């Protein structure tokens, strides 16, 4: 009898769209991580450590540039898609407007970087690598994850992403075998992504019968204008979360920087859990919030406390196994890295505290509040991180990162209480305090 109940419970979970979204989004991240781990020793052997470092440096510049290309559409796009799921006309307008906007932004960023290379002569050590890396901008522009996320149909895009990364790995094995081939590494990453992404867009057009139309310039302008705060929020959040290593570089030795970097990379991977969970349930909570408010509160509370429980388990697991993880990745018992990882291991749990606050402000499209909160948290991180790094080194940066997660939670909660008190109390205390609509 117990086995039958467990089997039914498992089947119901597998059929749940939010659960499926979580699995598919996780598979995208896992495949990206695995391909990086597999390609790393191949590239180091083929092009050498020095060129490998320049390839990664170029990729870092492109990753930052992609924040401009995405322009916050990864936050607003799924919401608009979820609301218009049943209207192919609206989906067509939305897909066309966002894709064309991102392509134009990719072109603008590519032109600016090209000017920086050939006119102002910056990035001198890796100019050719960076030029060939520009194709990744167009891969990002055509990546339609946001669209399938809103539709809650992530199977196709997750499979497409795996094929893209395997195509990239195949290209490395076949064509990269000497140091002067380093400029083609990121080019292959961009080319494989762009090829698969274009095929997915053809699938949307011909199989899903969602037409692609060129939007008017005014529509593109209005779209970018309405998304400016989400873009700025993404930018400031990126600095808050990933700025620790840069700040530490001003105050520490290369050895300490390397030991901290190892721990930080592991932490940034496990921090993906709350982000993936948020993206997984986002489309469903958007629909529930607009159509079934009681159902929204019930589902949101259940997802929140489940997410908190899982993230706490993850944090405790990383804390307990830190020595094993560091030895597995570095082949050495680096005590500094182990200590840093133990401190940083609780970041996933602290980040999960804010899961519902973020979802509610996303649902209500509170872009300006998002930007204000992200700006304040970014300022706090830079100020606190700079002070603690100068006085306590890597330990100070670890403390600053933990404090930043708490600052985010405090600020989001404060804003939610002030602007949506009813929602706040219904979510966290399951308690009605007002009778008017939220």
Image (cartoon, helix red, strand yellow):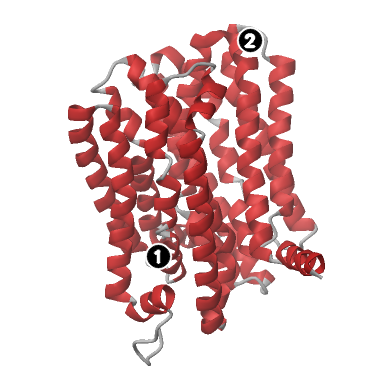
Does residue 92 appear left or right of residue 226 in this picture?
A: right
Residue 365, by quadrant, is: bottom left
First of labels 1, 2 by sequence position: 2
Give the x, y percent position of residue 23: 67, 52
Residue 221, by quadrant, is: bottom left
**Residue plotted at (57% across, 63% down):** 281
Is residue 28 placed above or below 82 in the rendered structure? Answer: above
Quarter of the image with the C terminus is: bottom left
Tag on residue 46?
Answer: 2
Element type at mark 2: helix
Tag on residue 388?
Answer: none
Give the x, y percent position of residue 312: 48, 51
Element type at mark 1: helix
Task: Return the residue found at the far front.
Answer: 1
Contact between marks 1 and 2 (CB within 8 A): the answer is no
Residue on which disc 1 sits: 357
Give the x, y percent position of residue 48: 56, 8
Give the x, y percent position of residue 145: 62, 51
**Residue plotted at (78% across, 68% down):** 2
Q: Nearer the viewer, residue 51 or 39?
A: 39
Does residue 409 appear left or right of residue 427 in this picture?
A: left
**Residue plotted at (32% across, 62% down):** 412
């Amino acid at each position: 009898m117990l086995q039958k109940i467990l089997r039914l419970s498992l089947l119901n979970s597998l059929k749940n769209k939010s659960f499926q979204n979580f699995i598919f989004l996780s598979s995208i991240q896992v495949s990206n991580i695995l391909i990086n781990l597999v390609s790393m020793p191949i590239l180091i052997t083929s092009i050498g450590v020095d060129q490998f470092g320049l390839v990664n440096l170029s990729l870092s510049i492109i990753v930052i540039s992609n924040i401009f290309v995405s322009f916050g559409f990864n936050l607003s796009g799924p919401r608009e898609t979820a609301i218009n799921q049943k209207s192919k006309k609206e989906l067509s307008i939305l897909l066309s407007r966002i894709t064309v906007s991102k392509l134009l932004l990719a072109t603008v960023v590519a032109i600016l970087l090209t000017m920086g290379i050939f006119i102002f002569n910056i990035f001198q050590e890796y100019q050719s690598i960076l030029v060939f890396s520009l194709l990744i901008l167009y891969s990002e522009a055509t990546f339609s994850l946001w669209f399938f996320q809103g539709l809650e149909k992530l199977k196709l895009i997750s499979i497409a992403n795996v094929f893209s990364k395997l195509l990239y790995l195949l290209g490395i094995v076949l064509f990269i075998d000497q140091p002067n081939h380093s400029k083609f590494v990121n080019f292959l990453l961009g080319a494989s992504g762009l090829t698969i992404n274009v095929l997915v867009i053809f699938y949307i057009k011909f199989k899903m019968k969602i037409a692609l139309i060129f939007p008017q310039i005014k529509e593109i302008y209005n779209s970018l204008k309405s998304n400016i705060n989400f873009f700025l929020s993404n930018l400031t959040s990126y600095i808050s979360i990933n700025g620790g290593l840069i700040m530490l570089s001003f105050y520490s030795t290369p050895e300490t920087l390397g030991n901290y970097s190892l721990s930080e990379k592991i932490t940034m991977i496990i921090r993906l859990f709350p982000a993936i969970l948020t993206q997984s349930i986002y489309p469903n909570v958007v629909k529930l919030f607009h159509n079934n408010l009681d159902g929204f509160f019930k589902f949101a509370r259940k997802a929140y406390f489940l997410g908190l429980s899982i993230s706490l388990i993850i944090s405790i697991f990383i804390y307990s196994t830190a020595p094993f993880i560091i030895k597995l990745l570095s082949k050495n018992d680096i005590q500094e890295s182990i200590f840093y990882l133990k401190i940083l291991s609780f970041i996933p749990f602290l980040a999960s505290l804010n899961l519902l606050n973020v979802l509610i402000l996303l649902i209500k499209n509170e872009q300006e509040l998002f930007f204000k909160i992200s700006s304040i948290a970014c300022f706090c991180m830079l100020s606190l991180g700079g002070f603690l790094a100068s006085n306590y080194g890597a330990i100070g940066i670890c403390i600053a990162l933990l404090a930043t997660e708490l600052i985010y939670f405090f600020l989001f909660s404060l804003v939610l209480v002030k602007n949506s008190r009813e929602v706040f109390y219904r979510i966290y205390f399951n308690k009605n305090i007002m009778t008017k609509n939220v």
